Image (cartoon, rainbow, N blue to C red):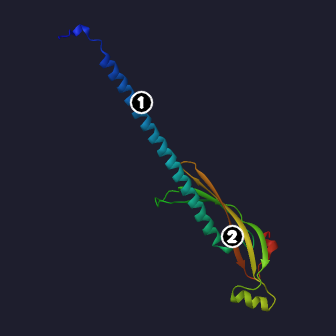
C-alpha cells in the first residue's frame, strides 16, 4: 500500500489554512472587544471623577453663608487638582444659588432662635437649589450636579434681598 506523492490533493493544507484564518479572526475580535471595554471603563471613570469634583465644589460652596446672603454669589471656573500634581484636572463652575423658599422657624430649633421667637425675632428656614458643572480639562467630559440645600439664617436675614 504505497501511495505516491503525486496522488495527494492537499486537503489537509486547505483545512489548516481555514483554521488559521478563523483563529486569527477570533484573536482580532478579542483584542477589539478588550480595547472597547477599556475605553468604556475610562469614560465611566472620568464621568465619576467629574461628578465627585462637582459634588465637592457644591459642599465647599454651601459651607460659606456669604455665598447666599446678602446677595447670592457664583464661582466661575475654579480649578481643581485631584491627583496633587499641581496641574488643574477639572474646571468647576458653581452657578448662583436659587432660593426656592423661606419661612420663619417656629418653634426655634436652637437656643438663639428660641430666644428670638420669645422677643418676636424669628430665624429663617430657607431652601436653595445650587448647580455645579465640572469639566475634565483633558478628556472634555462634563458633569452637571444640581442639589437642594436647607439653610437656617439668623433673624437679620431679609428673604427679598436673596431672591426668596
Q: Which of marks 2 and 1 is nearer the N terminus?
A: 1
Q: Is residue 18 above or below residue 31?
A: above
Q: Nearer the viewer, mark 2 or mark 1?
A: 1
**x, y (%) of residue 100?**
77, 68
- Image quarter in which the N terminus is found: top left
Q: Name the residue under label 2.
A: 149
**Left/right of residue 18 with respect to residue 158 in the rendered view:** left
Q: Which residue is drawn at 60% across and 63% down?
A: 55
Q: In this view, does 99 lie to the left or right of 41?
A: right
Q: Which mark is residue 3?
A: none
**Label 2 environment density (alpha carbons within 10 Å; few <14, some 14–19, many ≥20):** some
What residue is at 24 percent from the left and 7 percent from the top? 6
Specify whether 17 is left or right of 122: left
Q: Position of residue 153 (x, y in %)?
A: 72, 79
Residue placed most toward the observer, 134 or 16? 16
Q: Mark 1 points at which residue?
A: 25
**Does 50 appear above or below 36?**
below
Residue in view at x 78 percent, y 88 percent:
117
Q: Indicate left or right for 39 with 65 as reference.
A: left
Amino acid at each position: 500500500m504505497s501511495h505516491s506523492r503525486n496522488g495527494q490533493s492537499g486537503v489537509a493544507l486547505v483545512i489548516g489554512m481555514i483554521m488559521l484564518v478563523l483563529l486569527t479572526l477570533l484573536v482580532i475580535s478579542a483584542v477589539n472587544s478588550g480595547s472597547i471595554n477599556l475605553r468604556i471603563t475610562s469614560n465611566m471613570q472620568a464621568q465619576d471623577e467629574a461628578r465627585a469634583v462637582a459634588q465637592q465644589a457644591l459642599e465647599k460652596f454651601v459651607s460659606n453663608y456669604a455665598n447666599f446672603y446678602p446677595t447670592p454669589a457664583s464661582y466661575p471656573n475654579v480649578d481643581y487638582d485631584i491627583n496633587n500634581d499641581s496641574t488643574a484636572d477639572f474646571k468647576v463652575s458653581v452657578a448662583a444659588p436659587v432660593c426656592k423658599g423661606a419661612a420663619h422657624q417656629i418653634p426655634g430649633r436652637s437656643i438663639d432662635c428660641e430666644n428670638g421667637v420669645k422677643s418676636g425675632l424669628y430665624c429663617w428656614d430657607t431652601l436653595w437649589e445650587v448647580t455645579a458643572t465640572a469639566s475634565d480639562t483633558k478628556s472634555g467630559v462634563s458633569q452637571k450636579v444640581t442639589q437642594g440645600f436647607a439653610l437656617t439664617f439668623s433673624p437679620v436675614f431679609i428673604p427679598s434681598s436673596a431672591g426668596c
